Image (tube, helix red, strand yellow):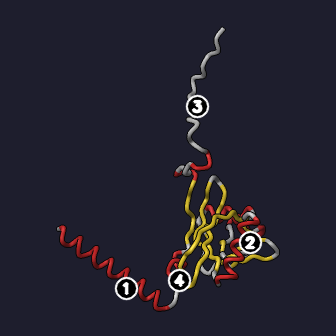
């Protein structure tokens, strides 16, 4: 007697599970540090998990997080996120979290040593760029950054204004 073939097709063997891009429903941006791109030159990016309490994750899912002036620093072989403000979760009342507490970042030891060595050697800062929900887990994108000088910031403003004027004139010429 021959075996019946299953009615459900199997996935092709050539696709790798780790290489697939997450679907739109599996990735949801929550907050971004827009000022970081103006104040710093981002050299390298890392993804890290965040160790959170119950009220903190509920507040993050509601979008009540502020990353301005937040940075990461290693201490005791662990990476910690400083100055990230997560607003208190209103329904929790008495059992709420401290909004400005330091939060542990979940990274591999090799990543932590690589980041701290680069930061110490080259004089770089590790800043939080954005927070997002990926597969129902909160993640933070960290950036190895070098501070911009004042004249670099002025140059960026001038370039942005020139691009805006060029787009405006192109739009006017089409009409």
Distance CA(mark 4)–CA(mark 2): 25 Å
Of callouts 2 and 1, which one flags the residue occurring earlier in the amino acid sequence? 2
Please say if 148 is above or below 91. below
Secondary element type, mark 4: helix
Secondary element type, mark 1: helix
Check contact, mark 1 vs mark 3: CB within 8 A.
Answer: no
**82 sits to left or right of 21:** right
Distance CA(mark 1)–CA(mark 4): 15 Å
Residue receiving disc 2: 113
- Residue at left 46%, top 91%? 151
Instruction: From the image, state whether disc 4 or disc 3 is nearer to you.
Output: 3
Q: Position of residue 59 (x, y in %)?
A: 65, 65
Residue receiving disc 3: 10
Q: Residue furthest top?
A: 1
Residue receiving disc 1: 158
- Residue at left 74%, top 66%? 110
Viewer-nearest residue: 104 or 92: 104
- Dot 1, how many residues are within 10 Å of its Cα: few (below 14), some (14-19), or many (20+)? few
Q: Name the image quarter holding residue 162.
A: bottom left
**132 sits to left or right of 116:** left
- Dot 2, how many residues are within 10 Å of its Cα: few (below 14), some (14-19), or many (20+)? some
Secondary element type, mark 3: loop
- Residue at left 58%, top 50%? 19
Residue receiving disc 4: 39
- Dot 4, how many residues are within 10 Å of its Cα: few (below 14), some (14-19), or many (20+)? some
Of callouts 1 and 4, which one flags the residue occurring earlier in the amino acid sequence? 4
Q: Which residue lies furthest to the bottom in this view?
A: 150
Q: Where is residue 53 in the image (x, y as percent from the top left)?
A: 75, 64
Q: Can residue 175 be seen in this view?
A: yes
Q: Where is residue 90 in the image (x, y as percent from the top left)?
A: 67, 67
Of callouts 1 and 3, which one flags the residue occurring earlier in the amino acid sequence? 3
């Amino acid at each position: 007697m021959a075996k019946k073939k299953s009615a459900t097709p199997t996935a092709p063997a050539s696709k790798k599970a780790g290489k697939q891009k997450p679907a739109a429903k599996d990735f949801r941006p929550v907050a971004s540090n827009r000022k970081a791109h103006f104040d710093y030159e981002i050299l390298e990016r890392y993804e890290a998990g965040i160790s959170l309490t119950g009220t903190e994750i509920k507040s993050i899912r509601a979008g009540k997080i502020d990353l301005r002036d937040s940075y990461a620093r290693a201490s005791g072989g662990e990476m910690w996120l400083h100055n990230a403000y997560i607003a208190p979760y209103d329904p929790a009342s008495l059992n709420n979290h401290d909004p400005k507490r330091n939060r542990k970042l979940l990274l591999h030891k090799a990543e932590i040593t690589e980041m701290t060595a680069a930061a110490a050697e080259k004089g770089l800062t590790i800043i939080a760029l954005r927070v997002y929900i990926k597969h129902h887990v909160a993640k933070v994108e960290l950036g190895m950054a070098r501070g911009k000088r004042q004249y670099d910031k002025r140059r960026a403003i001038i370039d942005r204004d020139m691009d805006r004027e060029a787009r405006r004139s192109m739009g006017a010429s089409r009409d």
